[in-house]
Image: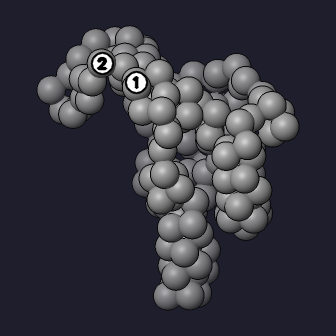
Amino acid sequence: MLASLHRSWTRSGNEDGFTRNEIGFDEQRQLFDLLCKLDRKPPVVIDSDDLLADPASMVEKYCKAIGIPFIAEALSWEPGSRNEVLWYDGDDSIWHETLKNSDGLKAQPRITIEVDELPRRLQALYRDFLPHYQHLHRHRLRP
């Protein structure tokens, strides 16, 4: 995620990429821990790798976990802009363009990047964020 975000932001002319606070792992962990304390149980967590590997199964498990019906038809749609979606139409909105052109939530190939291949700044962020990610990951819905 860090490499993808860095690549997108630097390509759009932002040499520094993003700030630590714009990633939100610290805040996600804080919110997760607060909800655990308030509700006395962990909130539902989905890992994006699990979702992208098997979208239908993970969405079905998510729906069951939060008590709503699973609607398989909701996993596909017609490509193109839709009024109900607020699109960011910046100069380099590759994520939004990819979504606009998609026709559903489908398994996606994962691109793995070795941490030692990242720029130093991203390596440091990775090390800082890893404990937060691991904490949330332990509580995720299992595939």
Q: Marks 2 and 1: CB-CB under 8 Å?
A: yes
Q: Residue furthest front?
A: 15
Kindly identify the residue that appears in the image at 54 percent across and 35 percent down. 5
Where does label 2 land, which residue? Answer: 91
User: Which quarter of the rendering shows the N terminus?
Assistant: top right
- Badge 1 crowding class, 10 Å Cα cut-off, few under 14, some 14 to 19, many 20 or more, is some
Tell me the residue at 64%/33% (across/down): 3
Q: Residue 93 in the image: x percent, y percent?
A: 36, 22
Disc count in the image?
A: 2
Q: Residue type at mark 2: give it.
A: Asp
Where does the image place residue 104, in percent across and percent down from the top left?
46, 20
Mark 2: few/some/many CA within 10 Å (<14, 14-19, 20+): few
- The front one of 23 and 28 is 23
Q: Is residue 133 left or right of residue 35?
A: right
Residue 6 screen position, x and y as percent: 56, 34
The percent coordinates of residue 129 (x first, y second) are: 68, 59
> Label 1 amino acid?
Ser
The residue that label 1 is drawn on is 12
Q: Secondary structure at mark 2?
A: loop
Q: Is residue 137 above or below residue 85?
A: below
**Of the pair 118 and 26, the residue shown nearer to us:** 118
State whether residue 55 appears in this view: no
- At horizontal 84% and vertical 37% (from top left) the residue drawn is 116
Q: Is residue 142 left or right of residue 61?
A: right
* Marks 2 and 1, the one that precedes in the sequence: 1
Q: Name above or below for residue 14 compared with residue 34.
A: above
Distance from Cα at disc 2 to Cα at disc 1: 7 Å
106 w.r.t. 143: above or below: above
Q: Secondary structure at mark 1?
A: loop
Q: Which mark is residue 80?
A: none
Answer with left or right where residue 86 lies relative to residue 6: left
